[in-house]
Amino acid sequence: MTEVSVGNILANQRQFFQTGETRSTAFRHKALKDFKQTIIRNEQNILAALNKDLRKPVFETYASELSLIINEINTALKYLDKWVKPKKVKSTVPTFPSKNYYLHQPFGIALIIGPWNYPFQLTLAPLVGSIAAGNCSVIKPSEISEASSAVVAKIINEAFDKKYITTVEGDAQVASSLLDQEFDKIFYTGSPAVGQIVMEKAAKHLADVTLELGGKSPCIVDKDADLDLSAKRVLWGKYFNAGQNCISPDYLLVHKDIKQAFYASLEKWINTFFTTDHQSSPDLGRIINEKHYDRLLKFFNDGTLITGGQTDKTELFIGPAILEVTDLDTPVMQEEIFGPILPVVEYSELEEVEEIVARNPDPLALYIFSKDRAKVNRLTTNIPFGGGCINDTVIYIGNHNLPFGGKGSSGIGNYHGKYSFDAFSYKKSIMKRYFRFDPGLYYPPYKNKHTFLKKIFLK
Ligand code: NAD
């Protein structure tokens, strides 16, 4: 895609945005309904694409791609009329008498750049917020999940006019030339390294940004936790989408007193979930490509294999692998794993947990298994992270009433449900004054009028 054609897309969308059509709530309702129907019509295409790209189990596609996005659309359809209402706020002593309110306004043209791991949902769920807020949008799916990228483009093509919403498929270079254009809002999901590039490019036009990034998400298992249930929940969260999940438990910190018992539970549940021949299980996805397969394989050098670890390059298969790690300076404890390898590090005191977690930048997610409220409060308060669960993993993403996002290197801003609408709107503040009364406090000559301000504020 040349710069000229990208420029044309933008010029057409800007022209359409300026007609004001996208601001009508009736238009937004219709767009959301059309979007939903087009997704439902393409259900089989979506399942086939995700099977091709990631051999994603059908259950996982329904649970984490289709259900999530349809729920986002249904939520927006249900609450849109409430969200768009002007929000009244109180007046203050110096601004009395006045009526004060703010409006949620669309930014204009939004660019949404998606990743490959949930290539459908993570690319299209932000679009729900963009439509609800009244923007025009350009979607750039990940080139790595090629089949899903084509389905995203097909759905957008079928549901919308290009002057309103369109897809631009392509690689990093295409993303880069899109970022050179003057968008009003950029919503990016992907790695922290590319997130920095996106923010730098956004700065040129002072575009508003939301960055949904990644990092190393710790999972802490304390000695008083229900070990068997904790092991089951850790494994489910870790092996969903073969661990290629921004919020999957990246590594485990397990209290030394229960480590051996926890290993036994992990092994039991791995073999219960996936039988003892993990490769034959229909419930384990595959690694996205050879590059990531080779990257993941290197992590096996960083610890001692406790259980699992079956691999087959011809199928891009890496089975569940529990790896005991003692050297915190190895890559498996420094890089985001984003795959089915689960390092385990033992700890004795809570201070050690805090020190180990602090070796890497702000996690996107944090999970704690413990019955001790004081310990849970200490960790959830002291550690900076985007979101997480106490006594479970990953499932918090299923509640659209919780804002989803990171902090610092794991992200800027958040979305889902009402927060998506907020992410794609800005607040326009308005004060209405009246002609019938004019207190005259702020007009010259000022003389001693400052004494009034002094009395109100400097006390
Ligand atoms: P990525 O950053 O490599 O790619 C994401 C998107 O950025 C793709 O569309 C790609 O074409 C584009 N891109 C790549 N290089 C670019 C460049 N130089 N300039 C502009 N655009 C460029 O990320 P990925 O490999 O697809 O995803 C993995 C990462 O994403 C992990 O770190 C993971 O934690 C994170 N992630 C975060 C979330 C979240 O919701 N916070 C969700 C999924 C993935």
Image (cartoon, rainbow, N blue to C red):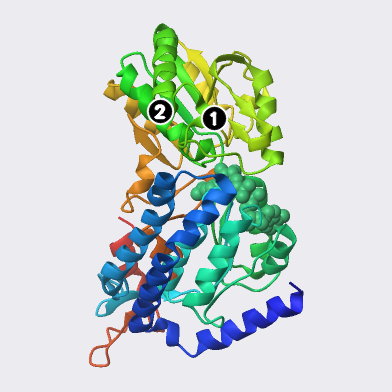
In the rendered picture of this protein, how many numbered marks are placed on residues?
2
Residue type pointed to by label 1? Gln
Q: Find residue 91 and report its image quarter.
A: bottom left
Secondary structure under badge 2?
helix
- The crowding category of the residue bearing disc 1, from other C-alpha atoms within 10 Å (few below 14, some 14 to 19, many at least 20), is many
Q: Which mark is residue 279?
A: 1
Residue 408 appearing in the image: no
- The crowding category of the residue bearing disc 2, from other C-alpha atoms within 10 Å (few below 14, some 14 to 19, many at least 20), is some
- Spatial CA span between label 2 and label 1: 12 Å
Q: Nearer the viewer, residue 249 or 135?
A: 249
Q: Nearer the viewer, residue 368 or 88?
A: 368
Instruction: Tell which tag, 2 or 1, sits nearer the viewer.
Output: 1
Q: Give the side of residue 119 with respect to residue 382, left or right.
A: right
Residue drawn at x 28%, y 20% is 372
Q: Find residue 208 and report its image quarter.
A: bottom right
Q: Is residue 22 above or below residue 348?
A: below
Find residue 307 and report its horizontal and vertical position in percent.
52, 16
**Screen quadrant of the C terminus:** bottom left
Secondary structure under badge 1?
helix
Find residue 153 and report its horizontal and vertical position in percent.
57, 68
Q: Nearer the viewer, residue 254 or 351?
A: 254
Q: Give the side of residue 27 with respect to residue 46, left or right.
A: left
Residue drawn at x 23%, y 89% is 437
Q: Is residue 354 above or below residue 52?
A: above
**Screen quadrant of the N terminus:** bottom right
Q: Is residue 386 above or below residue 435?
A: above
Residue type pointed to by label 2? Phe
Q: Give the side of residue 168 with respect to residue 429, left or right.
A: right
- Which residue in the protein does label 2 denote? 273
Query: Of callouts 2 and 1, which one flags the residue occurring earlier in the amino acid sequence?
Result: 2
